[in-house]
Each structure stands twice: as structure tokens, then as C-alpha cells.
Amino acid sequence: MRECHGPCETAPVPGHVIAMGGFALPLVERMLELTGKPRPLLLYVPTAMGDTHARIAEFYEWSRALGAERDHLRLFGIPDDPLGRVAAADAILASGGNTANMLAVWRVHGVDRALRDAWEAGTVIGGHSAGANCWFEACVTDSFGPELQPLPDGLGLLTGSFCPHYDGEPRRRPAFTALVREGVLPPGLACDDGAAAWFDGTAFRGVLAGTPGAGAYRVTAAGEERLDVLPGV
């Protein structure tokens, strides 16, 4: 054991990441379980959807039975202590929507740094679609228009690239595999709509399926490899 003479700093312990191809309630329940708390505080971050009232109302409706305290982060209009809300959360769920816009708004308000700090302190983070893309170095996205394009400047908590909706949108698979094959995007992971990539810190733990038959793939320049799904969720 390391000896301390005077104050000792505790090394950060990165939390879990649940990067979902598409929304599935069992995957959110898994995020809450990973906090290890009987009634964790779940923070919903709908920046990618423009903080729309309808999506925030939907969150409070579908999360009612989760057994968690709930809060949401609003950055459009006049923000109300966004950094404090991020720091207080046990689990943080980012919505789908426009990945590029979300990252830009987060960076303006310092939320990108706050999210990294929270994760490094052990907070469980995750989300679906844009809310999964953001944690990686790069992704494929429709943020810039109907044609899928590479986005190279994610938060970079996790290395490599990510593709959501692998089975749910017919253009995703050919676009992502081509971008990786051509070296435009680094190798990465692709998740079907009901699947998630689970990371413990930066270590890939495996694939979780929130709906029957959902899966995930490791995609490299050589092709794709379907990954085993872990039992349970």
C-alpha cells in the first residue's frame, strides 16, 4: 500500500458507459443498477433534441417506475446550474438527436468538461444514438443533413468510433463500414437499436441486449465481427 505523508489525492475511478444503438428501457435500468445505489439520481440531458418540452415530459413519464430520483438539464434559454446538476447525478442519460449541435452547446457551457469530471469520479453515463456517439472519438451522423457523414470530434472518453441504429436504418451499416474501410473513421463499434456497448471505465466489458435478437459488431478496415451478447441485461 502506498504511504501518504500529509494529504493524499485519490486517483479518479472512471464510471461505466452504456452506449446504446437505440433506446431500450432495460438498458437504462442497467445503468441505474451499476450506480450501486438504492435510489440513484438520474439526470436526463436532452440537448441533442433542443431541450424540447415534449421530450422532457416524456422522460418523466417513462422513468416514473424506475425507482430513481430524477432531474433534467436544460441549456437552451436560461440555464439553471448545469454544472451543479451534472456533478450531483449518479447516472446521466443523454438523448438522441443532433450529435454535432449537442457537442457544440455542451462546449459553450462547459458541460463537456463537467461530464468528463463526473465520469472520472465514478458517475454512470450513457445514452442512445447521439447520446452514445458523443462519448467516442468519432462517429457517423446525420447531424449535417440527410446524407450520413463522419464526425471526428466527439468527447473522446472512449477510443475509436461508434455507429448507432445499425439494424434500424438501412443506410447506417454501409456508410459506417465504408468510412472505416477507407480510413476516414477509426475502427469502432456498431450497435443495433436494442443493444448497447458496455464499458467499465475505458475497458470494454461486452454487449448488452435490451430487446431480443439485438446485437453489436466490431468494425475494422477488414470487415465486421458480430460480438457475443452477455447474458441478462
Image: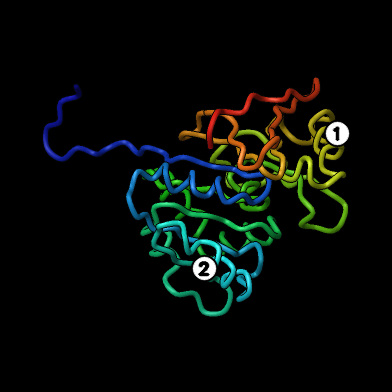
Asked if residue 20 lies left or right of residue 17, the reply is right
Amino acid bearing label 1:
Ala
Q: CA distance from mark 2 to mark 1?
A: 39 Å
Q: Residue furthest left?
A: 5
Circle 1 packing at 10 Å, graded few (<14), some (14-19), many (20+), is some
The reply to whether the C-beta atoms of the residues labelled 2 and 1 are less than 8 Å apart is: no
The image quadrant of residue 9 is: top left
Percent position (x, y) of residue 101?
A: 68, 62
Residue marked by disc 2:
60
Residue at 42 percent of width and 71 percent of height: 81
Percent position (x, y) of residue 145?
A: 84, 58
Residue at 62 percent of width and 57 percent of height: 103
Per the rendering, the mark at residue 178 is 1
Asked if residue 61 lies left or right of residue 138, the reply is left
Residue at 61 percent of width and 58 percent of height: 95
Per the rendering, the mark at residue 216 is none
